[in-house]
Amino acid sequence: MAAPDHTPTETSDIRAEAKGTAPTPLSVLDLVTVGAGHTATESLRTAVELSRLAEARGFHRYWVAEHHSMPGVASSSPAVILAHLAAHTTRIRLGSGGVMLPNHAPLVIAEQFGTLEAMAPGRVDLGLGRAPGTDGATAAALRRSDRLNEGADDFPQQLAELTRFLDDDFPDGHPYARIHAVPGPVQATSPGGVQSPHRPPVWLLGSSGFSARLAGTLGLPFAFAHHFSAQNTVPALDLYRESFRPSAVLDEPYALIGVSALATDDEKEARRQIMAAALNMVRLRTGRPGLVPTPEEAEAYDFSPMEREFVDSWNTNVIHGGADEVRSGLDDLQKRTGADELMLTANAHSGAVRLRSYELIADAYGLPA
């Protein structure tokens, strides 16, 4: 089967220009967090508000991340959420940060994101990770298998299969040559068919060197999870750049980093909010996941010495405070890492605090009002 006559991805689908005085394009990573006393419905409404705010203020893209079996995170189905956000926005790029490829059949992902591309032509990103996005037991339930390492080890092969489905270009004789992801390029080859020349660009996500090297070797854009693996950021970005080989997608490396950043009108309030988010992480890391606690609950919590050490380490990598302080921290981080784009995630108990944070950061950089 000959490859369809279409352009899979254009560089313009990946690269962006900085707005205002920001050192790089700014984007949003939303975990759709659910705070104590709130519902998932409220959090999803906040996601709509935030996506529209981000679009209005000049943030470049808005990604949601796949997590499972975590009461405080309502983003278990990125494709469903992105479809909802597509109906409420018109320009901002929407994507997954990411979909955990080993949890799904590649054909299913190709169909889901082909559908999203049909809903929001030219503004859908497909970010892929190789971690489960949850604990081992939940991953086994998702995959119907307890051979979890096998899924991670097969990531390059799964990625190649997914790309073939997205481009509809399995070679003749391949078992899947007559299988097509729809919506997709096959519609352009059908009698009377007309199909968009675009398909969602694939990004590789990572928190270590594996995906950095793979993204570089394949000439794909790379997103690094600085917000929970800060010590590996510079080595991973260096590895990505050193491994990079020009491709039809990119002629030069393009790397964004996820950054925890929270701006508030009162610097003390920023500290209260990040302590609540840190307590949430303590509970998650110790097998007690729950809703994001209130700042008052975090203030009353008696942290053990080990928990206090974890919290201090975790909060070191959260850029927080007043708008000017957060802007300065983001500027310094970009200089230190050379990241091409900063994707900000605001972890706080309430949606109102998160919305206000992005407003303050946009104001600090003079983004469009």
Image (cartoon, rainbow, N blue to C red):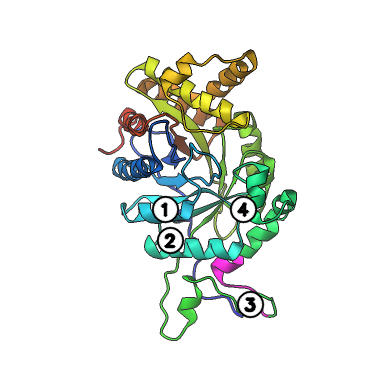
Give me the C-alpha separation between circle 4 and circle 2: 22 Å
State which quarter of the image contains the N terminus: bottom right
Q: Earlier in the sequence, mark 1 or mark 2?
A: 1
Q: From the viewer's perspective, is 187 left or right of 128?
A: left
Instruction: Give the residue at mark 4.
Output: 142
Q: Classify mark 1: helix, strand or loop.
A: helix
Instruction: Give the residue at mark 3.
Output: 177
Q: Classify mark 3: helix, strand or loop.
A: loop
Q: Residue 277 at what x, y percent from top left?
A: 48, 27
Is residue 171 magenta-colored?
Answer: yes
> Which stretch did the figure color magenta?
164-172
Marks 3 & 2, CB-CB < 8 Å contact: no
Rendered position, 126 above or below 62: below
Mark 1 vs mark 4: give the one in front: 4
Q: Amino acid at mark 3?
A: Ala
Q: Earlier in the sequence, mark 3 or mark 2?
A: 2
Q: Earlier in the sequence, mark 4 or mark 2?
A: 2
Q: Amino acid at mark 2?
A: Leu
Give me the C-alpha separation between circle 3 and circle 4: 27 Å
- Residue at 58 percent of width and 31 percent of height: 288
- Quick one: label 4, few (<14), some, or many (20+) residues within 10 Å? some
Q: Is residue 244 visible?
A: no
State which quarter of the image contains the C terminus: top left
Residue furthest to the left in view is: 369
- Residue at 51 percent of width and 45 percent of height: 65
Q: Amino acid at mark 4?
A: Leu
Q: Residue 167 at what x, y percent from top left?
A: 55, 68
Marks 1 & 2, CB-CB < 8 Å contact: yes
Instruction: Give the residue at mark 2.
Output: 116
Q: Earlier in the sequence, mark 3 or mark 1?
A: 1
Number of marks: 4
